[in-house]
Image (spheres, grey):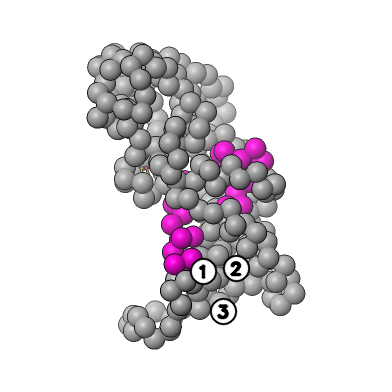
Amino acid sequence: MKVTFKIWRQESPDAKGTFRAYQVDDLTEDMSFLEALDHLNELLVLKGEEVIAYEYDCREGICGQCGVFINGRAHGPHNNMTTCQLHMRSFKDGDTIVVEPWRAASFPIIKDLIVDRCAFDRIIEKGAYISAKTGTAPEANAIPIPKSVADAAMDTAACIGCGACVATCKNSSAALFTAAKINHLNKLPQGKAEQHQRVKEMTWQMHEEGFGSCTFTGACEVECPEEISITNIAEMNARFIKSKIFG
Ligand code: FES
């Protein structure tokens, strides 16, 4: 299988970036997208050229580190899939594949396809936890939780923080990510004690980081590999108003 990768190359955060084309002739359909990039890097090493910087850890859709734009879509051509879960069989022989990093002011480019997503970490630090005494784990059924609530909390906990929602939003809004992290804990009894503080501080930090406002275009929901629903944003907004009244 032969493809041409057009890949964003940028030496450093302040350097001027540009697309560079690389033709690779000996890929197979069974290769994952990241394996194809690995192979391209091996070819670059053999030629004595600088390898392409990209990020990954788990390569199984869990860690959220591998996100890039592929032919204009976050994580590539399929819905509900991370870049590392994408395979070369999704492309045709002879295709040109354009690969670029997330584009958002709050995610500055570090090098090539790697962006700095520490803004997400700083939002998490503001409240995506519960304050609980450490010690022996409590009995699992000591606090009854209705199944519908547990299921809804699990749906939001599925967010892997990849940043596709921000990168694909025309406003570079982090509302879907922040809402998922807030609602996950605020739905559960264990998260109730800090619910008002959590929603106020995490949304404040989201704005501090320079993310744009949500205008409910729904693009984030479409590109989210974990299918986090945009209804979470409406729920976060309602929780924010409630926190202003009762918090
Ligand atoms: S490498 Fe972990 S989600 Fe892709």
Amino acid found under the numbered disc labelled 2: Arg
Residue count near mark 3 (Cα–Cα under 10 Å), binned few <14, some 14–19, many ≥20? few
> Which residue is pictured at 57% across the width and 38% down the height?
168
Which of the labelled discs sits on residue 168, or is there none?
none
Quadrant position of ligand 1: top left
Q: Position of residue 72 (x, y in %)?
A: 52, 28
Say whether disc 3 or disc 1 marks the residue closer to the N-terminus: 1
Residue 193: mark in rendering:
3
Does the segment drawn in magenta span residue 244?
A: no
Residue marked by disc 2? 198
In the rendered image, residue 112, in percent from the top left (x then y), is placed at 46, 28
Q: Is mark 3 within 8 Å of ligand 1?
A: no
* Proximity of marks 2 and 1: CB atoms separated by less than 8 Å: yes
The local crowd at label 2, few if under 14, some if 14 to 19, many if 20 or more residues have their Cα within 10 Å, is many
Separation of disc 2 and disc 3 at Cα? 9 Å
Name the secondary structure under disc 1: helix
Quarter of the view holding residue 106: top right
Left or right placement of residue 68 versus residue 127 in this view = left
Front tag of 3 and 1: 1
Q: Earlier in the sequence, mark 2 or mark 3?
A: 3
- Given the image, on which type of amino acid does mark 1 rest? Leu
Residue at left 48%, top 26%?
71
Look at mark 1 in the image and give the residue it sits on. Answer: 185
Q: In what quadrant of the picture does the N terminus appear?
A: top left
What's the CA distance linking mark 3 and mark 1?
10 Å
At 43% from the left and 21% from the top, the residue drawn is 97
Residue at the outermost front position? 148
In terms of secondary structure, where does tag 3 sit?
helix
The amino acid marked with disc number 3 is: Ala
Depth order, front residue of 105/213: 213
User: Which region of the structure is painted magenta?
Assistant: 151-176
